Amino acid sequence: MPEWLDDFLWTYQNLVHALGINGLLALSMYVVLAVGQLSLGQAAFMGLGAYSSVLLTLKLDLPFLAVLPLSCVAPVLFALAIGVPTLRLSGVYLAIATIGLGEVLRAVYLNVDWLGGALGLSGIPGRAESWMIFGLLGVAILALWAVGRSAIGRAMAAIREDETAAQVMGINLARYRLGALLASAVLAGLAGALGAHSSSFIGPNEYGFEPAVTILSFALLGGIGTPLGPVVGAWILTLLPEVLRGFSDLRLVFNGVIIVLAVLFLPEGLLALRMRRHAA
Amino acid sequence: MTTLLRTLALTLHYAGLFAVDRVDLNVQPGSVHALIGPNGAGKTTLFNLISGLVAPTEGTVLFRGLDVTSLPADRRTALGLARTFQTSRIFGAMTVLENVLTGLQPRCFAGLIATVLRTPAFYREERALVARARDTLHMVGLSARADLPAATLPHGEQRLLEIARAIAPEPALLLLDEPAAGMNPAETAALANLVRRIRDLGTSVLLVEHDMGFVMDISDAVTVLNFGRCIFQGTPAAARQAPEVMEAYLGQKVAARLAARAPRMTV
């Protein structure tokens, strides 16, 4: 690695890691939106990944490359428990259930002693490397892009446009919605484990309602025409607070204004490019 | 030959109102079968029951000899049932070709892993799907529109696209809900030819239509519904002269007067 890049990464490591991790979170939101569902559980899935990975590291001292895949287990199990009953129905049931999940888990983290309670868990070794974060982000973007340009992607687009017509095309709505939610749980779980192992500390409030809304705003700003849209949205909303450091108290206001403006004037997001799905 | 589609005492009632009341319908393979009746007779509701979008209160739906009454719509599609809607429900944001490709969903077998890894099998399937979709567009005369966003097509072409999307996987039975609605006479004549060609290629057609000229022209069999009941089943020629059909459309008094004046008066 050239020296200047090494220096740069050293100085801005937290920010660089945050860009990659928020990119993964944005993609985890994207897969759910891509089948026309709304989830506010991305932060909760991330928290499950973070807490389970930290326990595996601190209590069992497993190597990080083993911890990383295992950190997806808890989010996937919770996604199944929530998705199977709610995704058979059309409407906002998933959104409501996932808000509930986030709040319940927050209460659990706060009140269970071996999860650190309100103090959270600290002393986490910084084992998340930039190459892991950006490697996974790259693989996720490529995989989602490949899926988007295929029969599976066409089925997802059909569900988004007209559920009844999609069903009559032979598309099993529940199966696609559940598959998307599970993929989303995996991505959020990985992001949680990577985030925890690059920040040395995790606490209950990092995975509540507010981060859930921030993750949604990544996708709203970037648009869901391609998987790149949400990642660009995440990067803008991650860099913006750094640029606006002087207005510390107003940062959330800026985020809110951006979301409102994006919804009003850019309903398809910044990257309104639409993929050509038919030609593989 | 066995009956392709059969409903046995199929019934749907909402809070005491019988939308569909003990309907026994038989659609023979290789036929164009028309379902007619005054507004509110339950034709579209019967379509929803047959395609699986609405569950019946009582009764049975047999499709290709299988009891599909409890199967969801997507499973019935996989068995070879296809339909269009009364107001067209194309995917407006997709291109015309993508709409037809989406209709080919029952022929898509590439799994997630093959899709992500872009295996040769994935490309082979995708090429076969595109070729089939282009053939279907050619058949309905929309080849030149393949790459346009579907929402930009005029009304008549959107209806043709919906038919193309439905017939692309070569279903055994196609349900057409008022295909000629809003079409001019030339378009209607072309549609009649298309329906005949669909039948000749091996897809039976069950259609709801108010354009009687169109119905009499292309149907092999006619079923008349009124107030959710099946009041007539037979050939188009017999339907023209059946007093109960005339009554359903014109009311008892007018029908009786017409019958007295001109015995061969048609509906």
Image: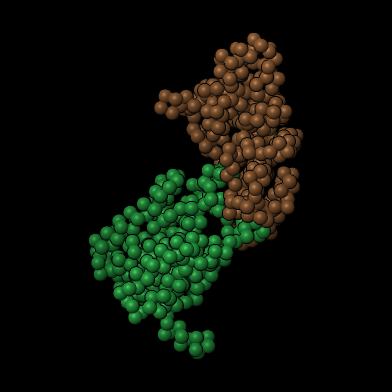
Chain colours: A green, B brown
Looking at the rendering, in which quadrant would you find the N terminus of chain B?
top right
Residue B29 in view: no
Residue B84 in view: yes
Looking at the rendering, in which quadrant would you find the C terminus of chain B?
top right
Where is A174 relative to A219, above or below?
above
Q: Residue at x 49, y 66 (%)?
A: A222
Where is B261 relative to A57, above or below?
above
Q: Which residue is at the front of the view, B236 or A206?
A: B236
Q: Residue at x 73, y 50 (%)?
A: B143
The picture places residue B74, in percent across and down from the top left corner, at: 56, 41
Q: Is residue A36 left or right of residue A277?
A: left
Q: Is residue B89 left or right of residue A16?
A: right
Q: Which residue is at the front of the view, B124 or B5?
A: B5
The picture places residue B206, in percent across and down from the top left corner, at: 64, 31
Q: Is residue B138 left or right of residue A22?
A: right
Q: Which residue is at the front of the view, B258 or B198?
A: B258
Q: Which residue is at the front of the view, B254 or B79?
A: B254
Q: Which residue is farthest bottom?
A: A3
Q: Residue at x 63, y 54 (%)?
A: B149
Say which quarter of the image contains residue B207. top right
The picture places residue A27, in percent across and down from the top left corner, at: 48, 64
The picture places residue B258, in percent across and down from the top left corner, at: 63, 14
